[in-house]
Amino acid sequence: MIRSLVRTISLVFAAMVIATPAPAQVVQSLQLGVGGFFPRNLDSRVTGDVWVADLNQPDVVGFPGTTASLLFDPDSFHGWTIFGEWNLGITPRFELGTGASFYSRTAHSRYRDLEHGLRPSHPDIEQNLSLRITPISVVGRFLPFGRPSDFQPYVGGGFSLMNFRYTETGEFVDPETLEVFGDQYKATGWAVGPIILAGVRIPIKGDIYGLTFEGRYQWGSGDTGGAAAGFLGDKIDLGGGALNFGFLVRF
């Protein structure tokens, strides 16, 4: 699948370049920057999502009203990203871009109900939940008005090939035996999903350099392996919104 997507991306760019009637019409640009990524809220995450499962475990057998749920703040996964993108202006109103970004964040968690009764001398049974996403994206942008030397708003969309790594590391409790043990559970893989975006470009003294402000939203989910891999959910939702700030140079 990955090789097919890479070949498709290469063919799309080659076709666009060949189809352009005059080389002078092709404007390339490079943008680099930082941003913030905000994963989807719990009420909108994919069915089977591991965070939802971790937070909503049923009662422990033999202990009514006591769950093996983890306690953590999903907002702890809000984090910084870095990105780079190369763009090819096919016409004054449309461009094609491909780029990559990097996001990594860790949230701290503990058991919500079990710790005090199991280990009074050291009650907190803690874990680190870590998510890393490296999306490779292909997008198209439509710039309805303005020139490179002007303030230019735009909208667009495309798709993203997301490499992900999700781990749960620390101490865990067997809900049947109430045994406390240390372990790490890891899921890695690739996922594909759509992107929508909107933003503005602000020139810096001409049409060569500029600042970019862009909002994006992506969808997609990866497989964790479920119970066979030690996870309570068989999916990890990779979707969410991003707000990016960049520096652009045309050549």
Image: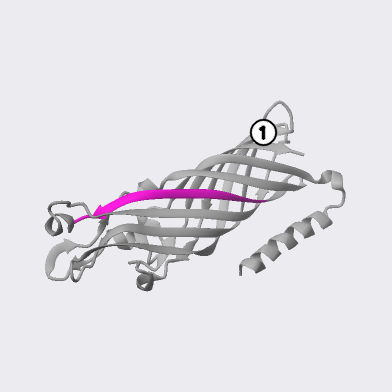
| Residue drawn at the location 15% of the way across and 62% of the way down | 66
Return the x and y of residue 217 as percentages of the image width and height.
Answer: 52, 51
Is residue 181 rendered to the left or right of residue 74? left
Where does label 1 land, which residue? 210
Range of magenta residues: 98-113
Residue lying at the far top in this picture: please name it: 205
Task: Determine if residue 210 is in view.
Answer: yes
What count of labels does the image hold?
Answer: 1
| Residue drawn at the location 56% of the way across and 55% of the way down | 135
Quarter location, residue 112: bottom left
In the foreground, 138 or 179: 179
Q: Mark 1: which secondary structure?
A: strand
Is residue 55 rendered to the left or right of residue 154? left
Is residue 222 rendered to the left or right of residue 17? left
Task: Determine if residue 92 is in view.
Answer: no
Asked if residue 104 lies in the magenta stretch, the reply is yes
Return the x and y of residue 156 as percentages of the image width and height.
Answer: 62, 50
Residue lying at the far bottom in this picture: please name it: 228
Coloring applied to the structure: one colour
Return the x and y of residue 167 as percentages of the image width and height.
Answer: 40, 59
Residue lying at the far right in this picture: please name it: 22
Q: Quadrant of the N terminus?
A: bottom right
Dominant SS of magenta comes to: strand
Circle 1 Cα neighbour tier, 10 Å, few/some/many (<14 / 14–19 / ≥20) = many
In the foreground, 104 or 27: 104
Asked if residue 205 lies in the magenta stretch, the reply is no
Is residue 49 rendered to the left or right of residue 174? right
Q: Amino acid at mark 1?
A: Gly
Return the x and y of residue 89 as percentages of the image width and height.
Answer: 75, 46
Q: Quadrant of the C terminus?
A: top right
